[in-house]
C-alpha cells in the first residue's frame, strides 16, 4: 500500500513541477527573454501546454477576470496538495 502512496505522491509532485515550469516559460516568453521561434522552446512550450491546459481550462472558466493575472496554476497546485493529503489520511491511516 505504501508503494502506491509513494507513486501517487511522486506523480502529483511531478505534475506540480510541470505546472511551475509552464508558468515560468510563459513569463519568459511574455517578457521576451526566450525566443518562442526557437524549436526547442516551441516544442517545450507545446508539450507543457498540452499537459497542463486540459486541467487548467476548467479552473479558468470558474475564476473571475483578474485583469491578466492567471492564478489557475496556484489554485490547481493547492487542490493537488489537498487531494494528496486527503488520500494519505484515508489510506495511510487505515
Image: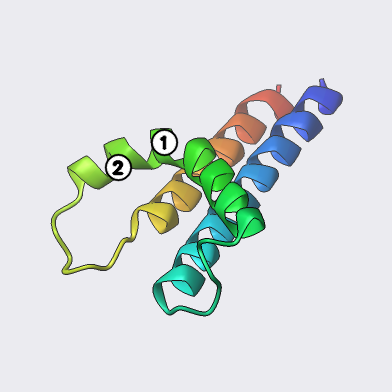
Instruction: Compare residues 85 and 35 and report the one nearer the observer.
Output: 35
Q: Is residue 93 above or below residue 65?
A: above
Please name the residue shown 60% across and 38% down the image.
84
Q: Quadrant of the C terminus?
A: top right
Marks 2 & 1, CB-CB < 8 Å contact: yes
x and y percentages locating residue 43 in the rendered image: 60, 47
State the count of labels: 2
The numbered disc on residue 21 is: none
In this picture the colour scheme is rainbow
The secondary element bearing badge 2 is classed as helix
Query: Quick one: label 2, few (<14), some, or many (20+) residues within 10 Å?
Result: some
23 left or right of 85? Answer: left
Secondary element at image label 1: helix
Residue under numbered circle 2: 59
Q: Quadrant of residue 70?
A: bottom left
Name the residue at the right extreme: 3
Q: Quadrant of the N terminus?
A: top right
Query: Measured along the vertical axis of the image, is residue 75 above or below residue 92?
Result: below
Looking at the image, which residue is at 38% across and 42% down?
A: 56
Q: Is residue 5 left or right of residue 76?
A: right
Q: Which residue is mark 1?
A: 55
Spatial CA span between label 2 and label 1: 7 Å
Q: Residue at x 40, y 33 (%)?
A: 54
Residue drawn 66% across and 34% down?
88
Locate residue 76, reporting x and y percent. Answer: 43, 47
Q: Nearer the viewer, residue 40 or 77?
A: 40
Q: Give residue 10's position: percent from left, percent from top.
A: 75, 40
Q: Residues within 10 Å of mark 1 (few under 14, many from 20)?
A: few
Say which of 26 and 41 sits in front. Answer: 41
Residue 65: % across, % down: 14, 59
Amino acid at each position: 500500500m505504501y508503494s502506491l502512496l509513494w507513486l501517487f505522491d511522486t506523480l502529483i509532485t511531478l505534475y506540480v513541477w510541470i505546472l511551475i515550469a509552464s508558468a515560468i516559460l510563459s513569463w519568459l516568453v511574455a517578457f521576451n527573454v526566450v525566443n518562442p521561434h526557437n524549436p526547442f522552446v516551441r516544442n517545450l512550450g507545446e508539450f507543457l501546454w498540452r499537459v497542463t491546459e486540459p486541467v487548467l481550462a476548467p479552473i479558468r472558466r470558474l475564476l473571475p477576470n483578474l485583469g491578466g493575472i492567471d492564478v489557475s496554476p496556484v489554485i490547481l497546485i493547492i487542490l493537488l496538495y489537498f487531494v494528496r493529503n486527503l488520500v494519505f489520511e484515508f489510506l495511510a491511516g487505515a
